[in-house]
Amino acid sequence: MFRDIFNYTLIASTIRLATPLILASTGGLFSERSGVINIALEGMMLAGAFTAAVVTVFTANPWIGLLAAVVAGVLVAGIHGIATINFRADQVVSGTAINILFLGVPALLSGALFASTGATPQLPRDQVLPDLLIFDAQSSPMLASIFNQKPLVYFAVLVVALSVYILKRTRFGLRLRAVGENPEAADTAGVSVRGMRYSGVLISGALAALGGAYLSIGQNSLFTRNMTAGRGFIALAALIFGKWDPIGAMLACILFGFAEAISIRMQGTVDIPNQFIQMIPYILTMVFLAGLIRRATPPKSLGIPYVKE
Amino acid sequence: MRLIRELVFPLIAVFAAFLIGGIIVLLIGDNPIEVYRLMISSAFGLFDALGNFTFDNWGYTLFYATPLIFTGLAVALAFKCGLLNIGAEGQLYIGAFASAWVAITFSSLPGWSLIPLAIFAAIAAGALWGAIPGILKARFGAHEVINTIMLNFIAVGLVSYLTQNHYKTPGDPIMQTVPIADQAQIVRFHGLLSPLGIDFPQRIPLNITFLLALLTAFLVWVFLWRTKWGYEIRAAGASPSAAEYGGISVRTQIVLAMALSGALAGMVGINEVLGYRHRYYHDFSAGYGFAGIAVALLGRNHPLGVVLAAILFGALSRGGLFVDIFTDKVSKDLVQVLQAIIILFVAMEALFRGTFSKFLPAPAKKA
């Protein structure tokens, strides 16, 4: 039984489950480091997942679907930006509204487009994102299982590496962080607080939407109602657990992906109720936020609208 | 004049949301005027298609409004203390399960003691679940928004586990507990009005909990604006440093406000379990906790406003069902879209303030 759960396919499954989390979490990082709370990751993922599936149905090309998801994510993030940056709406309230909006919009549109109650039609096998064939499944099944993944998996790793570089080594990253920590000072130094915050929020929309698209046209072959099932919030939890740092957030996503992979495998084999394993990310985040492991310090001006003097 | 100021912005937000919703309906390929006419008549109409008097429309609208009054009050009360409780969703699940648990476990008690006990269970369990993020904030400075999000998921997992593994009828394919004791059922308007000779149909689940919700709204108003405790909560929310200076412990107020907020959210369970389904039915909440945020915002965090906003949202839910059945393309999901747009517009008050405020009376100066 132990071997049924702990073998190399568990690693492969962890990678698959962590990927959408990593994309969304890294996205959220850009928004939050610029000072804008993003609890709308869930809604942005749903928007990306739905758009990717619908566009792929009509174009029969998952790559166009992927591109469309990014556009959708940026548009949705634009709503969050306009509401919170231009009109100083409460960032949590705006995020909640977006989450509710994208429970409704996909269902409404899929009803109109496909006469369904929230799902898109199943895509044929050759119209979902393909696996990269790096290793031969016959001669080396273990390596193939672990490394033959969707391109988005490798893209996610690339995104994390790039984020580290951008945030720590580029002028853009420095300005983004400055705006999140001390917008007054950044403004005085000639940095556009609005511009930086918009960049952060729009990047978060694009990446979260890619995470959603991975679910609908990568891991699955259709969109179903509320298919993210809280992954946007887990990504947010990972972001906090990773101390608003790209590597930390990625490691947290892998940990949460691992927890989910185990919980899937344990269904029906082990007596620990599934619900408790699924709670792990949430409980860990709460314990962490309370400072019982180590202190989590968010960007200083997170959640505070900036009013130019 | 003050009342006009308070009413104008919410009404503009609702109107703007309906306008955008109408455009969406038009793009989907239905007639927005027809859709809205259908929604309004099915939510508020006093006569059915044959012209006979009916309680159905108002009855269901008020039934759907009941949980939203509780969650709206929950969000509003926390907001008065400067806290954003987006955990009403989890608190109401815990409250509902607790009241079902009491009404199942102590089935030998007579109704006059079992009903109050089950009501108390819903309130106490909700308060406990709400107090957790309050304590974490007061003690460790952990942000209540993140913790309430996390606790929503934990709550759903917990009650799902308990239902599935301990309180389900064996073999029942539906995720629901065994029924509660008969004497724990709360009387519906049917039973309440039939002695007066009024024939309110038994099928409409509107029950005494609605009246309890109105009473609760009044009590919340009394508490917040007429008692010392309410004053302290509002003071802590308005200016924490000034409150501390005035001898109010902001930490205590945070815990108290979150516990009371959770208690109000937990009261949703009274309507759902004791008044409606007579068992705990998993996943019953159609996002009541999140809709509560909209209700509180739209009601400007005032109990009377919350009641009115909850009735509007109840009407949307009722109307949405008819849209689902009687239109070609638009589904009841339009309601969720409208709710979300309303929240966005209410939150973006600056948008309207800039545009419309010059047409409004100036705010009253404090003497």
Image (cartoon, rainbow, N blue to C red):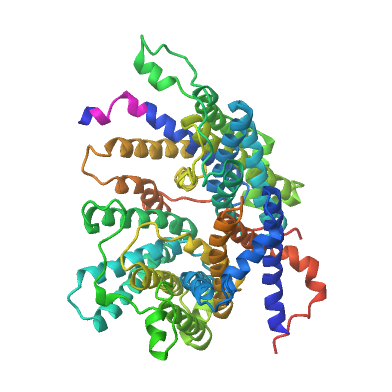
The percent coordinates of residue A21 (x first, y second) are: 48, 38
Residue drawn at point x = 38 percent, y = 30 percent: A13
Q: Quadrant of residue B364?
A: bottom right
On-image quarter of the C terminus of chain A: bottom right
Q: How many marks?
A: 0
Query: Which residue reaches farthest left?
Result: B108
- In the foreground, B270 or B325: B325
Looking at the image, the residue that sits furthest to the right is: B358
- Going 62% across and 59% down the picture, which residue do you hit? B338
Q: Is any part of residue A96 visible from this angle?
A: no
Spot the residue most to the top.
Answer: A139
Q: Indicate yes or no whether the magenta region holds residue A69.
A: no
* Residue A262 falls left or right of residue A291: left
Horizontal relation, residue A78 to residue A257: left or right: right
Residue A69 occupies quadrant = top right
What residue is at 63 percent from the left and 40 percent from the top? Answer: A203
In the image, which residues are magenta? Answer: A4-11
In the rendered view, tell whether residue B238 sits above or below residue A175: below
Residue A9, how many percent across, how many down? 34, 25
| Residue A26 x %, y % | 54, 39
**Magenta portion: prevailing SS class:** helix
**Residue B334 visible in this rendered orientation of the protein:** yes
Please, is residue B192 above or below residue A240 in the view?
below
